[in-house]
């Protein structure tokens, strides 16, 4: 199909310009800057080649370093570019909470949280053992404490650990939550599920916009993390493979909460901390451990002893002194 010079796709224009025999003269970034001028089609999607040629001609003849008019235009162009970047970085106002009462009920009860926001995960009736474990998790999150649970495979202990991490983080029960698995790779897989929930769960998006909306605004583009702002203030969000820092939002219970993951190696567990903008250094205050054994380590008495020592030493020492 013939190309319409009055309505060219950006990729077509770049390809055409770079075929002129002068090497690579145009790329996507440069064209994006040029398109701030009056060269676009009426719908803003394409580029009018004739307008673009005219604009380039005017720019060429005005490129006189001693020209005051050119310097003024250059300054205005720079200011427009900077303003466009600032506008793109700021996420603006947060959506309103869809159902405050539903949110408050879920914050108060871990069981309600699971049933409300993860009905597709916990679709079977709870057993007495499940309810017992849920109460223990709720007590540990709210008041602290230690407990271990053993459940059959497929009974939901992993997703209970994952949803407990989400619940604790969203309600701000601890400034730093750590999820530990048998290996670092397994830990990253568990954290990836949590990230997916925070990014895509529609009910969480409705009731926890202070967390989910800034995450959505990243659009899975890692480079947007450092520049993201909320009403002019940096959100300091971090969206990594082994650590997530929830957006810093005023009056948000989850503001700046850290969620990390690691494997059952002392070197991965020790030394975890985060320096917050207020100057405080936080360490993990809540740790959930899912299946710390591998099949290989379970058959080895020495490896099992080593993992018990890591749990008793490195894990219990993660919070630091006091």
Image (tube, rainbow, N blue to C red):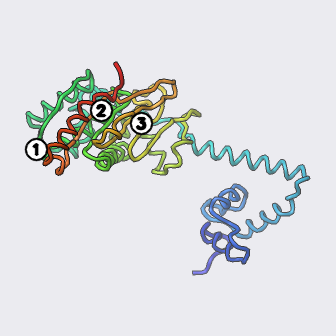
Residue 38 falls left or right of residue 235:
right
Query: Is residue 250 positioned above or below 220 on the image?
Result: above
Q: Which mark is residue 152?
A: 1
Quarter of the picture holding the N terminus: bottom right
Task: Tell me residue 48's x, y (percent).
Answer: 69, 67
Q: Which mark is residue 314?
A: 2
Residue 120: horizontal and vertical position, in percent?
22, 46
Quarter of the rendering containing residue 112: top left
Q: Residue at x 57, y 43 (%)?
A: 89
* Number of residues whose C-alpha sits closer than 10 Å to that of mark 2, classed few (under 14), some (14–19) or many (20 or more): many
Q: Position of residue 280 (x, y in %)?
A: 47, 24
Residue 211's disc is 3
Q: Are marks 3 and 2 in contact (CB under 8 Å)?
A: no
Image point (21%, 30%), residue name:
137
User: Residue placed at 25% from the left, 35% from the top?
Assistant: 310
Viewed as shown, does residue 68 lie left or right of 117? right
User: Between disc 3 and disc 2, whose residue precedes?
Assistant: 3
């Amino acid at each position: 199909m013939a190309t319409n010079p009055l309505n060219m796709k950006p990729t077509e224009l770049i390809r055409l310009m770079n075929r002129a025999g002068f090497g690579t003269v145009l790329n996507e970034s440069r064209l994006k800057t040029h398109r701030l001028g009056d060269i676009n089609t009426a719908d803003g999607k394409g580029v009018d080649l004739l307008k673009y040629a005219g604009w380039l001609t005017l720019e060429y003849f005005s490129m006189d370093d001693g020209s005051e008019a050119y310097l003024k235009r250059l300054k205005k162009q720079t200011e427009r570019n900077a303003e466009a970047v600032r506008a793109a970085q700021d996420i603006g106002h947060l959506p309103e909470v869809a159902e405050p009462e539903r949110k408050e009920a879920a914050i108060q009860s871990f069981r309600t949280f699971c049933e409300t926001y993860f009905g597709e995960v916990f679709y079977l009736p709870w057993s007495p053992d499940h309810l017992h474990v849920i109460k223990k998790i709720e007590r540990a999150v709210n008041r602290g404490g230690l407990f271990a649970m053993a459940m059959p495979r497929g009974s939901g202990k992993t997703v209970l650990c994952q949803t407990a991490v989400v619940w604790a983080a969203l309600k701000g029960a601890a400034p730093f939550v750590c999820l530990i698995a048998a290996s670092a790779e397994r830990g990253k897989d568990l954290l990836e599920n949590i990230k997916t929930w925070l990014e895509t769960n529609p009910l969480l998006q409705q009731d926890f916009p202070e967390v989910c909306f800034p995450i959505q605004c990243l659009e899975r583009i890692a480079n947007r993390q450092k520049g993201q702002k909320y009403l002019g203030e940096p959100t300091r969000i971090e969206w990594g493979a082994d650590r997530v820092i929830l957006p810093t939002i005023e009056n948000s219970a989850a503001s700046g909460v850290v969620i990390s993951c690691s494997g059952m190696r002392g070197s991965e567990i020790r030394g975890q901390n985060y320096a917050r903008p207020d100057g405080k250094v936080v360490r993990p205050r809540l740790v959930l451990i899912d299946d710390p054994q591998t099949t290989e380590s379970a058959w080895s008495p020495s490896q099992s002893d080593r993992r018990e020592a890591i749990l008793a030493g490195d894990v219990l020492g993660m919070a630091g002194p006091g």
